[in-house]
Image (spheres, rainbow, N blue to C red):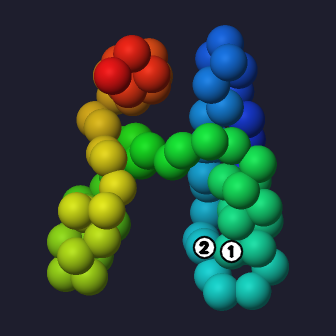
Amino acid sequence: MQIEEPASGDIVILDLNGKMTLGEGDEILKDEVNGDGSLKLLGLTKRITDLLTITKLLTVFETYDNEADAVQSFSSSASV
């Protein structure tokens, strides 16, 4: 799994590519996420959406179809 971090102001976006497997890949992701404030998911495939639905994790994470909405959601939640 590869993780890229394109810049978007104060918000860190993690662009994941490849297969996520238990072991090294999930540790890298965990370390990246633990360094930021909150996690929101963007651009999920149907397979991942189905998996999150089956495991009821879809109710745990905020998900977005596009980057603009996801980035905007951070400023919306900060003003609440």
Number of the front mark, 2 or 1: 1
State how many labels appear.
2
Q: Quadrant of residue 10?
A: top right
- Left or right: residue 67 versus residue 69 is right
Instruction: Quadrant for the C terminus, please.
Output: top left
| Residue located farthest toward the bottom when viewing the structure as drawn | 22
Query: Measuring 70% from the left and 62% from the top, which residue is drawn there?
Result: 29
Is 58 on the left-hand or right-hand side of 13? left
Q: Which one is in front, 18 or 44?
A: 44
In the rendered image of this protein, does residue 74 appear above or below residue 28? above
Q: Nearer the viewer, residue 2 or 75?
A: 75
Residue shown at 62% from the left, 25% from the top: 11
Q: Which residue is mark 1?
A: 26
Mark 1: amino acid:
Asp
The x and y percentages for residue 3 are 72, 50
The spot of residue 78 in percent (x, y) is 45, 22
**Dot placed on the residue nearer the N-terminal end, 2 or 1:** 2
Name the residue: 61% across, 52% down: 16
User: Quick one: label 2, few (<14), some, or many (20+) residues within 10 Å?
Assistant: few
Amino acid carrying mark 2 in the image: Met
User: Any mark on residue 73, and which?
Assistant: none
Q: CA distance from mark 2 to mark 1?
A: 7 Å
Secondary structure under tag 2 reads loop
- The numbered dot on residue 20 is 2
How many C-alpha atoms fall within 10 Å of the one at disc 1: few (<14), some, or many (≥20)? few
Depicted 75 relative to depicted 6: above or below: above
Q: Is residue 78 above or below residue 19?
A: above
Quadrant of the image occupied by residue 57: bottom left
Asked if disc 2 and disc 1 are in contact, CB closer than 8 Å, the reply is yes
